[in-house]
């Protein structure tokens, strides 16, 4: 036993007899498909991809990589832009064959396997008149989104995705399969909700479902740039006007075919057409150049933005935060700078900057100490979704996005720096950042407890590709 081929042949042998697939670089299209990611920027040529079909096979694979000291990552929906679900020369535990969703009608709970996409959850739950807080683009993975926190249109009413998580089934670094909930392994459950990628392979999530039988009012309005002050004026009233059943995303982009700057708004009202149009009437009165709002069944809502958010191209998320009201002059400056950058580089006009005005009243009812997730505060998420083509621009894009978000967050009333940060949340959403952000930046006061729990549940730091919870070993050079 020596070569990598021999080692993976042994793994194949251990996993044979079920539906699990072990793919190697020589396996043609199946292998090539398995390493594709939402962002090309995150595609790496793994030495082996194990598409596990059961929790037992996930456990066998974890024990195997531990024994053979093979570096590995876990892939849920493949949408992160941090690169933490892909690996060069290591092994991928790919959960994409595990997409079953079951609903317990009596308890109103939804159990989703670890590789489920939000479309699976939305559609199955809707058959029973239920919904939970899921992602706004439904081909996103339940795994990464939930383990990092999770915001959706229903956040204003029901809080974060992790606030609706009742239990998880996890394969730990030891290979042991356990359940974590408020009553079983509660410390692990505390850590999973916000820092889950560091603690194991979650093979199933159980969510609280909520009755959602009515269709919703939603869709985009597009404005020309000269309307920006008026649109910001409306957004500033949204803060006090909403009762949790509304959301409004405000975005800047230059979409094809014209590649000309526009203001994009995505509206949501969990109610009738009359209620929706009445709530957003002042915005409609500003005069959008396109109005694509309509009534939708809830399970179609999260498909609304799918089209502009497909696979392909190099992409990177960045995260910041802002408070309302926003000064129109400040938003104009951000608009000008963002649009200037995206139009002065090649193939970047589809990039998007988003003021995600999703009501936080339910989010801040839960203290930051309640679980690992630490981004609860009286502010909203600001996000960049950069898209480009040339690898030579990677560093330039990263630096631009980071600097813009930091400045914008500060100017919009949210401090992200540890030494000046207020008592509220950290001011950055973990699912929008890269893995070079420190545990202190992402988890604030919760970082110390996470370090202790990491030592308890993953003492050898096998799940090491996300945000680093334990310090790197010090290398002494003589
Ligand atoms: C188009 C688009 C829309 C988005 N919209 C939203 C939104 O509305 N709300 C929101 O909150 N976020 C949103 N996001 C951000 C999203 O939360 C992250 O990109 C998230 O990482 C995606 O999860 P994934 O499973 O698809 O990604 P992956 O890249 O597969 O995984 C991300 C991380 O989680 C780990 N992981 C995934 N599944 C598991 C599992 N079952 N067990 C253990 N570890 C696992 C991976 O190892 C990796 O470290 C969006 C992202 C995109 C690309």
Image: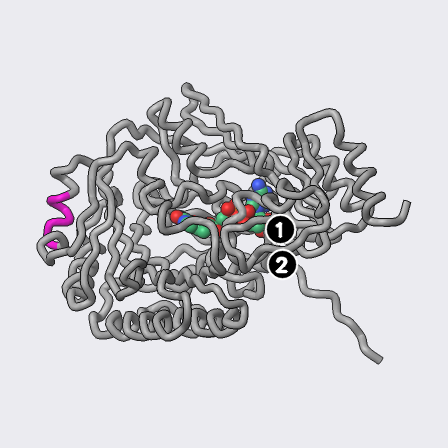
Q: Residue 386, image x and y in percent?
A: 42, 63
Q: Which mark is residue 6?
A: none
The kind of secondary structure the magenta stretch mainly shows is: helix
> Which of the labelled discs sits on residue 198, or is there none?
1
Question: 63 and 138: which one is in front?
Answer: 138
- Mark 1 or mark 2: which comes first in sequence? 1
Q: Position of residue 142 (x, y in %)?
A: 49, 41
The N terminus sits in image quarter: top right
Residue at the limit of the structure toward the left, as seen here: 285
Q: Is residue 360 left or right of residue 221?
A: right
Q: Tell me the residue at 48%/53% (across/down).
A: 312
**Ligand 1 is within 8 Å of the C-beta of the residue at disc 2:** no
Left/right placement of residue 422 relative to residue 179 reads left
Name the residue tied to disc 2. Answer: 469
Spot the residue most to the right: 1
Task: Classify mark 1: helix, strand or loop.
Answer: helix
State whether residue 369 appears in this view: no
Q: Does the beta carbon at disc 1 come under 8 Å from ligand 1?
A: no
Q: Position of residue 235 (x, y in %)?
A: 21, 58
Judge whether 404 appears above or below 270 on screen.
below
Question: Does the residue at mark 1 contact the one at mark 2 (Cβ under 8 Å)?
Answer: yes
Label 2 secondary element? loop
Side of 73 relative to 181 (left or right): right
Count of numbered labels shown in the rendering: 2
For label 1, the crowd category at 10 Å Cα-Cα, with few meaning under 14, some 14 to 19 and many 20 or more, is: many
Q: Residue at x 51, y 36 (%)?
A: 116
Chain part drawn in magenta: 277-282
List the single residue furthest toward the top: 106
Foreground: 444 or 473? 473
Q: State the separation of the CA atoms marked 1 and 2.
A: 8 Å
- 202 w.r.t. 53: above or below: below
């Amino acid at each position: 036993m020596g070569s990598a081929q021999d080692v993976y042949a042994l793994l194949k042998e251990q996993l044979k007899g079920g539906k699990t697939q072990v793919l190697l670089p020589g396996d043609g299209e199946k292998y090539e498909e398995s390493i594709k990611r939402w962002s090309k920027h995150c595609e790496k040529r793994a030495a082996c991809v194990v598409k596990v079909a059961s929790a037992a096979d996930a456990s066998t694979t974890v024990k195997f990589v531990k024994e053979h000291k093979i570096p590995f990552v876990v892939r849920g929906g493949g949408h992160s832009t941090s690169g933490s679900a892909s690996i060069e020369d290591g092994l991928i535990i790919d959960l994409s064959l595990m997409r079953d969703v079951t609903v317990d009608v009596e308890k109103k709970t939804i159990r989703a396997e670890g590789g489920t996409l939000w479309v699976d959850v939305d559609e199955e739950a809707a058959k029973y008149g239920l919904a939970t807080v899921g992602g706004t683009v439904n081909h996103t993975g339940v795994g990464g989104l939930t383990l990092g926190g999770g915001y959706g249109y229903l956040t204003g009413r029901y809080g974060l995705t992790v606030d609706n998580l009742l239990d998880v089934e996890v394969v730990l670094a030891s290979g042991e399969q356990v359940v974590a909930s408020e009553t079983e392994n509660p410390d692990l459950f505390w850590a999973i909700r916000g820092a889950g990628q560091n603690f194991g392979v979650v093979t199933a999530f159980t969510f609280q479902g909520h009755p959602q039988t009515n269709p919703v009012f939603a869709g985009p309005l597009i404005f020309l740039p000269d309307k920006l002050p008026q649109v910001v004026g409306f957004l500033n009233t949204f803060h006090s006007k909403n009762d949790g059943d509304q959301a409004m995303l405000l975005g800047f982009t230059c979409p094809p075919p014209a590649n000309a700057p526009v203001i994009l708004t995505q509206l949501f009202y969990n109610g009738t057409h009359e209620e929706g149009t009445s709530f957003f009437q002042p915005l409609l009165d500003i005069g959008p150049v396109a109005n694509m709002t309509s009534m939708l069944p809830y399970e179609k809502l999260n498909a609304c933005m799918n089209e502009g958010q497909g696979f392909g191209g190099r992409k990177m998320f960045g995260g910041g935060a802002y408070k309302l009201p926003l000064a129109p002059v400040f938003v104009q400056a951000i608009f000008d700078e963002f649009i200037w950058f995206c139009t002065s580089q090649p193939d970047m006009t589809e990039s998007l900057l988003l003021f995600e005005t999703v009501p936080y009243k339910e989010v801040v009812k839960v203290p930051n100490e309640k679980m690992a997730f630490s981004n609860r505060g009286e502010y909203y998420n600001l996000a960049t979704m950069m898209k480009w083509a040339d690898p030579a621009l990677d560093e330039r894009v990263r630096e631009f996005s980071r600097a813009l978000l930091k400045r914008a967050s500060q100017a919009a009333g949210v401090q992200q720096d540890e030494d000046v940060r207020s008592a509220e949340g950290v001011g950055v959403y973990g699912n929008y950042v890269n893995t070079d952000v420190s545990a202190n930046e992402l988890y604030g006061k919760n970082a110390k407890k996470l370090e202790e729990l990491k030592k308890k549940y993953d003492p050898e730091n096998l799940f090491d590709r996300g945000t680093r919870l334990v310090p790197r070993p010090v290398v002494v050079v003589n």
